């Protein structure tokens, strides 16, 4: 029995239309050889009888090497047992069948590498031949389809993160999912999110999968350009690493090489234009990342940045709402507390002047201690109001040398003993016009920031000097009218870590802080800025990383300041005997104290507890009143400001002095009432009341 030399030369029916002299067998052989897809002719046992050149190129063999091999050799080791059973089942019922359209198929090449393929099986049994033709196509042969599928897959992963970001308010949940999504979508071994710390000196590993030693969650990595994330920070754009073994732009940790990592892709992400972190993926394959992977990772990082911005905005809003609630609460507490302090301080002052007490040294000590405690209570109330930014400034003459000496004494007792404090004040430095308590609070805020910038100790240097004008960098912060005259520069210099330009530019922004969560509100320097601006001054910062920071307050000089003691004495003498005062106060105990103050000042006093009662008394009294002294808050009826307006309309020569324990009321009144009216903050002493009365009498038309 004669066997055909080749399956291709088997007898075939004549093909009509062939030119004369061309044999059908040569046509079929040429077609088999020239076909662009890989073709294998496989027998029932799985042996390869024929292979075309395309198959040899795809699978990495010579044509002669493929012939005689079993197709199982072309199947990856992990699925070879299953493939044998599939082939056996197919041999029982052979039929035309496409493979790889609904699932991923992988062919193993001679060098062990794998290639994604689609396979079409065509049995030849119905043609009388015991073979199956396997047509194999590299999926890379049609990249547009592959690219579309890849983009759709990436879009699905982005949608997953988008849904998560909308559903959760927990930023850490989002941070934990980003590396997982990146690793799954890109099919890589390592993915991680690194956040730049507020100091901008190092990164913190916030989340990740497949992390190598030294980059565990919470680990800190320097941000200088010789580190992998630091290089991204320095470049400010995406960085692709084709092969770590050939990388020379930054130092590659040995842990990367030990883990078999070869290629990487890292993209930065930003918050309102400011660099805040890096999203990195790494693979054990060389040259793993191209344009599609870059676009996907950039989209993922943008979505993460948006989530970070939203959470931070919500936190800032919640913080502001909490501060507003605290402000409202402290305002209400301050009103009642200041009324109580007015009663306590007033009665103590009256008690101190009683003849029986004046001659008793021990009693004087007790009264003095109680008076000092009540003053500290008033200071505490003022600090609560300053925290809520409802404090009304009371500018006065401030001796900066004395203030700094007092502040330095307190700081030496409270700051780290490793921090040295030095004071350098220019002899004859003029006083400044500012609220003494708020100036001290501002300097204290700056000193606390300086302390935090010197965790290992250092030097805190206070300096004052008079200057004829403002330096150019802050001159435009004030109007032309406010820049005339001299200023006193109060500078506070630390030897700490300093600030970057980005941090320095945002230092005065409310809620901006470089401190860890729970260690700062971000209101310290913004409060300093607001105080200085309200005092018609300016503030400047000079700093650079590693060289410390200097904060300088420029406050207006005070000229021809009268000594406080003389002012106090003159004010009491300036009140004419028999001055007629209408006192309106709804708190009976406060009313009694103020009545006593006025009586000891030689005034004739009529009292009322409501505005309506006061107007009736003033209308019915035959003798005119000189001064209306009224609380602003008078219970459910007419307020003190409305009472003063109506009273002055009826009695044009009436002087007005308003008082309140609510700083917010005083602030509102300060904006709305005539300049001739005076505002007095509770609690106050008899001398403060006397000075206020003297001022309203002097301003009376």
Image (cartoon, rainbow, N blue to C red):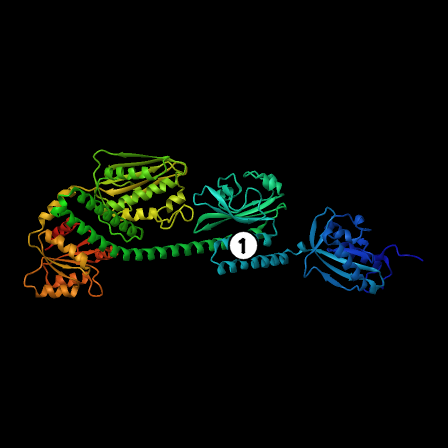
Horizontal relation, residue 271 to residue 445: left or right: right
Foreground: 277 or 615? 615
Residue 444 place in picture, x, y as percent? 31, 43
Quadrant showing the N terminus: bottom right
- One can see residue 467 in this view: no
Horizontal relation, residue 350 to residue 87: left or right: left
Foreground: 377 or 616? 377
- The single residue placed furthest to the right in the displayed view is 1
Horizontal relation, residue 343 to residue 271: left or right: left
Residue 575 place in picture, x, y as percent? 9, 51
Residue 212 place in picture, x, y as percent? 58, 44
Foreground: 189 or 95? 189
- One can see residue 81 in this view: yes
Residue 149 place in picture, x, y as percent? 61, 58
Give the residue at mark 1. Answer: 177
Quadrant showing the C terminus: bottom left
* Residue ID at (29%, 34%): 423
Foreground: 4 or 682? 682
The quarter holding residue 86 reads bottom right
Badge 1 element: helix
* Residue ID at (28%, 52%): 385
């Amino acid at each position: 029995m004669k066997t055909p030399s080749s399956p291709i030369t088997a007898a075939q029916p004549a093909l009509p239309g062939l030119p004369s002299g061309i044999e059908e067998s040569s046509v079929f052989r040429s077609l088999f050889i020239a076909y662009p897809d890989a073709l294998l002719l496989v027998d029932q046992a799985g042996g390869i009888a024929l292979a075309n050149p395309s198959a040899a190129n795809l699978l990495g063999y010579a044509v002669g090497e493929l012939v005689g091999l079993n197709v199982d050799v072309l199947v990856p080791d992990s699925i070879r047992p299953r493939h044998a059973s599939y082939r056996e089942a197919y041999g029982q019922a052979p039929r035309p069948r496409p493979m790889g359209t609904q699932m991923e198929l992988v062919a193993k090449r001679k060098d062990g590498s794998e290639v994604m393929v689609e396979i079409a099986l065509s049995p030849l049994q119905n043609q009388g031949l015991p073979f199956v033709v396997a047509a194999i196509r590299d999926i890379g042969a049609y990249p547009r389809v592959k690219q579309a599928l890849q983009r759709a897959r990436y879009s699905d992963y982005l949608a997953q993160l988008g849904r998560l970001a909308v559903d959760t308010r927990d930023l850490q949940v989002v941070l934990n999912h980003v590396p997982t999504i990146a690793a799954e979508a890109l099919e890589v071994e390592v993915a991680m999110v690194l956040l730049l710390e507020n100091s901008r000196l190092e990164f913190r590993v916030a989340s990740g999968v497949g992390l190598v030693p030294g980059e565990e969650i919470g680990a800190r990595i320097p941000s200088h350009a010789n580190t992998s994330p630091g290089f991204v920070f320095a470049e400010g754009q995406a960085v692709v690493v084709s092969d770590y073994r050939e990388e020379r732009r930054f130092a590659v940790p040995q842990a990367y090489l030990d883990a078999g990592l070869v290629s990487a892709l890292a993209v930065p992400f930003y918050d309102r234009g400011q660099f805040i972190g890096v999203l990195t993926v790494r693979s054990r394959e060389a040259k793993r990342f191209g344009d599609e992977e870059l676009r996907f990772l950039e989209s993922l990082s943008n979505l993460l940045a948006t989530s970070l911005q939203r959470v931070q905005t919500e936190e800032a809003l919640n913080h502001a709402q909490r501060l507003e609630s605290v402000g409202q609460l402290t305002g209400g507490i301050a009103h009642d507390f200041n009324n109580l302090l007015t009663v306590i301080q007033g009665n103590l002052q009256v008690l101190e002047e009683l003849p029986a007490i004046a001659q008793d040294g021990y009693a004087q000590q007790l009264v003095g201690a109680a008076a000092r405690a009540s003053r500290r209570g008033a200071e505490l109330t003022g600090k609560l109001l300053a925290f809520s930014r409802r404090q009304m400034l009371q500018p006065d003459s401030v001796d900066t040398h004395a203030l700094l000496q007092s502040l330095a004494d307190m700081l030496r007792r409270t700051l780290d003993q490793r921090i040295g404090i030095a004071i350098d004040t220019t002899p004859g430095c003029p006083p400044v016009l500012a609220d003494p308590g708020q100036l001290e609070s501002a300097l204290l805020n700056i000193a606390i920031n300086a302390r935090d910038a010197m965790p290992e100790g250092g030097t805190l240097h206070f300096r004052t000097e008079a200057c004829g004008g403002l330096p150019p960098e802050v001159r435009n912060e004030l109007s032309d009218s406010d820049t005339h005259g001299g200023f006193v520069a109060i500078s506070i210099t630390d030897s700490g870590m300093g600030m970057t330009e980005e941090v320095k530019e945002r230092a005065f922004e409310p809620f901006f802080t470089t401190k860890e969560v729970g260690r700062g509100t971000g209101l310290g320097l913004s409060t300093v800025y607001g105080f200085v601006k309200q005092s018609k001054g300016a503030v400047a910062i000079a700093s650079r990383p590693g060289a410390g920071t200097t904060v300088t307050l420029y406050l207006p000089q005070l000229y021809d300041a009268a000594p406080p003691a003389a002012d106090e004495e003159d004010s009491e003498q300036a009140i004419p005997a028999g001055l007629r005062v209408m006192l309106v106060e709804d708190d009976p105990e406060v009313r009694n104290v103020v009545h006593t103050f006025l009586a000891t000042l030689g005034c004739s006093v009529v009292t009322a507890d409501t505005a309506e009662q006061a107007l009736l008394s003033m209308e019915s009294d035959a003798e005119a009143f000189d001064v209306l002294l009224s609380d602003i808050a008078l219970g459910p009826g007419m307020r003190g400001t409305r009472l003063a307006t109506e009273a002055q309309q009826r009695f044009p020569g009436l002087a007005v002095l308003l008082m309140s324990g609510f700083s917010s009321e005083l602030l509102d009144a300060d904006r709305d009432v005539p300049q001739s009216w005076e505002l007095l903050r509770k609690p106050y002493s008899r001398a403060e009341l006397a000075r206020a009365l003297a001022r309203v009498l002097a301003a009376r038309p």
